[in-house]
Image (spheres, rainbow, N blue to C red):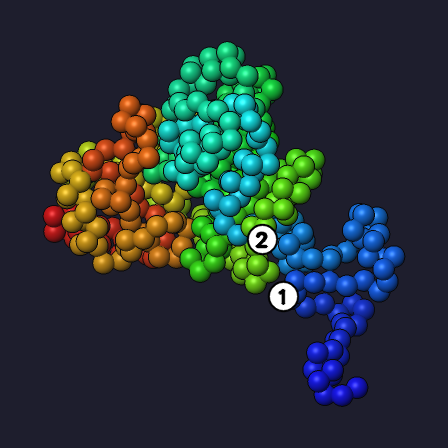
Amino acid sequence: MKDKTRLVHPPHVLLPEGNRPLVAPIYQSVKFEHDTVADTLRSLRGEKDGFFYSRSANPTTRQLEQTLATLQGREDAIVCSSGVGAIAQTLIGLLKADDHVLCFVETYAPTRSLLRRTLQRYGVRHTMLSIEDDAGIERLLESTPTRLVIFESPTNPITRIADIGHITRQARAAGALTVLDNTLAGLHQHGDTDVDLFIHSLTKYASGHGDVMGGAVIGSAQQIRKLRPDFVLLGGVLDPHAAWLIQRGLKTYLMRYEAQSDAALHIAQYLEAHDRIARVHYPGLARHPRHELAASQMQHFGTIVSFDLRAGAAAGDRFADALKLFAIAASMGSPESLIIPPGLMGPHDLPAELGALAGIDPGTVRLSIGLEDPDDLVADIEQALAAI
């Protein structure tokens, strides 16, 4: 074998029987081979385990899918390149022309846009309510044939809480699927509910370090088997290296989420007592309108704390500028604490009558609590409030 050939076909290093790496390798390969054509065909037909092309499956991404499914209390999962990719591909895989979707004003803005613009062009209809309108949800599902209900709990940014049991019961009675964007609540929560499919942005808490993007849909083996062909065809694949980074981040996921939630409650309690704050939105507070419901559904109340400044929008933007430890940045779940000020807030994609239902005040500020010492964060907030 000449050098040119030797470099393209290097030696294979096989681990001896009973000898395993403590950390799984990254299978940074697009293609996989079998020994024979017959073995390849058997694998492609599902008669033999194996991999062929990473757009369809890869050992590294498959490990991540199995980890996520187990953590969420379901049988299987599909990972893809972003959270919004998981939302879009799930909706495309489930919906067809003339299907009806129930969604909510508090829903993630890209989800609203997918339903109101993209899917509407292809004949998918929708109705938008408030997540707290339990009676309206019941009336709608009783009166309008509905394919699926997509919702969040807690909602972003003002942490409204869905009555998940009520929604799933009403949807199941109406023959509708339920899809819960569970990103804010995290992978370890709501698995004991009757939700059909969970969607997560892995960019947030799963990765936990703000340096990699990913998304996932999690559900029963049957539901995931139905969705996977569309995910493969649409091609929004998660790169194996990104999957490996997310898998690594998951090792500290529960410790991070618990610590950040504890800190968020501490900060919410401080803000609740401050005379410059009109209202604090955090489900862990006894004054939250659905605190008891949240406590019955959740182990941890989350890392997002929102509040309404009495002084309004301009003061909120000045407050963000005065902070030293909070970055003015999108997303959540990273070690760094983040802030979205009023100038970057609001359901700008909705008409005024729907936007008003979202409950976002001109002075609403959203904090994503990181892993800094909570007392340092409180001190930073205190000096920023004094500065405005």
Q: In which quadrant of the rendered view does residue 301 lie?
A: top left
**Residue drawn 72% across and 88% down?**
3
Quarter of the figure that contains the N terminus? bottom right
Q: In which quadrant of the rendered view does residue 148 lie?
A: top right
In front: mark 2 or mark 1?
A: 2
Q: Earlier in the sequence, mark 2 or mark 1?
A: 1
Q: Position of residue 111 (x, y in %)?
A: 44, 37
Left-right relation of 182 to 79:
left
Determine whether 4 is above or below 125 in the image: below
Camera-side residue of 367 and 291: 367
> Identity of the amino acid at label 1?
Gln
Left-right relation of 314 to 188:
left
> Judging from the image, what secondary structure is the residue with disc 2 in?
loop
Q: Which mark is residue 259?
A: none
Q: Which mark is residue 237?
A: 2
> Identity of the amino acid at label 2?
Val
**Residue drawn 19% across and 53% down?**
321
